[in-house]
Image: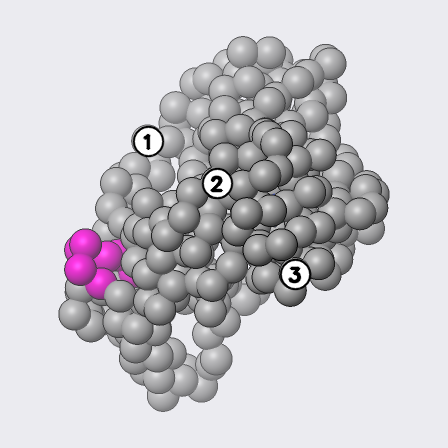
Amino acid sequence: MKFERLLFDIDGVKVNKDVSFGSITTMGVGGKAAYVVQPCCTEALEKVMRLCDAQGVRRKAFGAGSNIIAPDNGYEGVIILFGRFMSNIEGDKSRVVCQSGAKLSMLAKYSEVYSLGGGEFLSCIPGTVGGGTVSNAGCFGGECSQIIRRVFLTDGNRRTDMTAEELGFGYRSCDLPEGYVIYAVEYRFERAYYDVGERIRRMKEVKAKTQPVNTRCAGSVFKRTGEYIPAKRIDELGLKGLCVNGAAVSYRHAGFIVNDGTATQKDIVELIELIREEVRKQDGRELTLEVELLG
Ligand SMILES: Cc1cc2nc3c(=O)[nH]c(=O)nc-3n(C[C@H](O)[C@H](O)[C@H](O)COP(=O)(O)OP(=O)(O)OC[C@H]3O[C@@H](n4cnc5c(N)ncnc54)[C@H](O)[C@@H]3O)c2cc1C
């Protein structure tokens, strides 16, 4: 039977066709995704994964799309979108289990309400539990791997779970096994004997002052390597404001590329290459990407 008909036939998923990547990524570039599918539970998620795999249709998990720069010519496949559904947060004292689509900022809010410490930094990252795990997101000295106990995965046929050690976290990375999707994550917090909310407010203030948080962007474009901070060097090299059509190096934070609303993935890729070329010339270094170029 035709793929589309079988997809619409799965209970517990919301299916949309020809969805603009502008509406599901924070950078807001890219063409259309053939299908965006939002599962309401793990069983429905697995049915979608099995169907895609059986019919040879590409699939890609998406959280808030805050680390992804989407392709201009679109995506002939299924975007499995977590966020609106599968976003429960359930706690038992310091042990908290979240479904993949829960916003990291909601988890920070939860930790504030229950006086749990160590996850304040999550309030400053506009991603989800699934995406934050994959990229081991972090800031202000914290990163997700420090508070993750266990990650729950499925490949559509088989469920498994892995400890943080087994998942091999690195700087903004982890070794997610091929073909698997994260459906839940267990965190462990410390009891906080200080005002968690106050710490969150201070972090958010710093973030809003130093980063273009209300502009279309996808966070830091390049990874740090040890003491080498790309944003600092890009600033020193006078590259703030450098642009290719609607894509520009942010004046507020040289590590960010912002989209004025007219940029394409091609513009961003060209701008990235200009920056890399200048850094190569001046410092003899190869910058590696923190953002993900899809396609
Ligand atoms: C204004 C701004 C500020 C930012 N600041 C920071 C910061 O301080 N620190 C930082 O680390 N990052 C930062 N980022 C980048 C981004 O928010 C993080 O990388 C975030 O963790 C991405 O989460 P997401 O849900 O948006 O993932 P997405 O961008 O949707 O996806 C990222 C990757 O994870 C995969 N993925 C998503 N969900 C799942 C799942 N359930 N199972 C398997 N794979 C999945 C996707 O396939 C993709 O490969 C910032 C971004 C913006 C726009």
Q: Disc 2 residue type?
A: Val
Element class at badge 3: helix
Residue 205: numbered disc = 1
The numbered mark, 2 or 3, whose residue comes first in the sequence reads 2
Number of other residues with Cα within 10 Å of mark 3, as a class: few under 14, some 14 to 19, many 20 or more: few
The reply to whether residue 276 is in sight is yes
The reply to whether residue 256 is in sight is no
98 relative to 34, above or below:
above
Residue identifier under label 3:
55
Between marks 1 and 3, how big is the CA–CA gap?
A: 48 Å
Highlighted range, magenta: 257-263
Q: Nearer the viewer, mark 1 or mark 2?
A: 2
Between marks 1 and 2, how big is the CA–CA gap?
A: 38 Å
Please tell me which residue is depicted at 48% across the width and 80% down the height of the picture: 286
Q: Disc 1 residue type?
A: Glu
Q: Is mark 2 within 8 Å of ligand 1?
A: no
Element class at badge 2: strand
Please tell me which residue is depicted at 17% across the width and 55% down the height of the picture: 260
